[in-house]
Amino acid sequence: MFALNSKKADDHGRANYLGAEERRVLPRPLRRVVRFGLSLATGRIHIPDHTGTFATFGFFAVVGLYGMSLGGHAQTVAQATTAAVGFAIEDVRVSGNDQTSEIDILQLLGLDGTTSLVALDVDQARRKLSELPWVRYAEVRKVYPRTIEVMLKEREAFGIWQNGSDLALIEKNGSIIAPLRDSKFASLPLFVGREADKAASAFVDQMAAWPELRSRVKAYVRVAGRRWDLHIDNGVVLKLPET
């Protein structure tokens, strides 16, 4: 009886000992960390010289970039960095700009020789170009490493509209393009008076039936928004009835 109890006690003690041993075994991830720490402590892993210095610089660089991002300067940093490593825009290829000067395009986009191609916002550039008086729509494309292509579709001048003392170029639908400042548009038909800009296209189409007369008209004057007076090149004024 005593021997049996003693054996049970020994088995119970061994089980407790094994349980304690099992509880002292570290999880696999921690074992790797401990082994790495022991290797560093015993010199089995060699750390290159200046690693601490580089790590410190790297840490402060990350902190600095994060701070600039929070401060809204990330775009400026990206602009300066990418331009410095060879992505500064050096060539601008413009097409479709009969009336829009390349200088206006460069100034509007802020291209000064240091602008980064990587940081350039194509959608924003397109919106800015579309605000120019002559531009109907614009396309902007990046060509790496240092070129952008600007393709414009410009509005077409149909005539000159005189409203009071103001002269403006208009499209066929009557929309104003820009004030008249260039004599090269002098050959366009002149429409005078209130609402003449909106009624011009339809009336000129009607005049197509009399091409000889139309070629001699110096000005189409809208009267009271209801009819036209035609000023002919010989000084005669044809007063047309209301239509």
Image: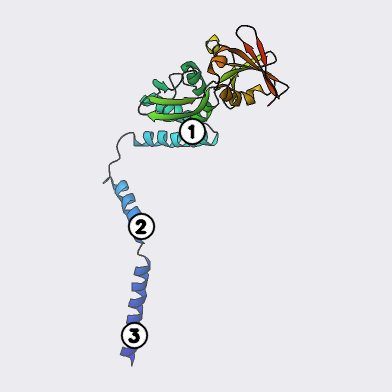
Residue type (three-letter) at the residue carrying disc 2: Pro
Please indicate whether residue 7 sits to the left or right of residue 205 in the image: left
Indicate the secondary structure of the residue bearing disc 3: helix
Label 3 to label 1: alpha-carbon separation: 83 Å
Mark identifier at residue 123 = 1
What percent of the width, then of the height, locates residue 143?
36, 28
Q: According to the image, label 2 marks what residue?
A: 29
> Nearer the viewer's eye, disc 3 or disc 1?
1
What percent of the width, then of the height, locates residue 108?
52, 22
Q: Earlier in the sequence, mark 3 or mark 1?
A: 3
What percent of the width, then of the height, locates residue 199?
63, 25
Quick one: which residue is furthest to the right in this view? 224
Label 3 to label 2: alpha-carbon separation: 37 Å
Residue type (three-letter) at the residue carrying disc 3: Lys
Indicate the secondary structure of the residue bearing disc 1: helix
What percent of the width, then of the height, locates residue 47?
30, 40
> Nearer the viewer's eye, disc 3 or disc 2?
2
Location of the N terminus (image quadrant): bottom left
Would residue 70 be seen by someone viewing this image from the given angle? Answer: yes
Q: Nearer the viewer, residue 108 or 119?
A: 108
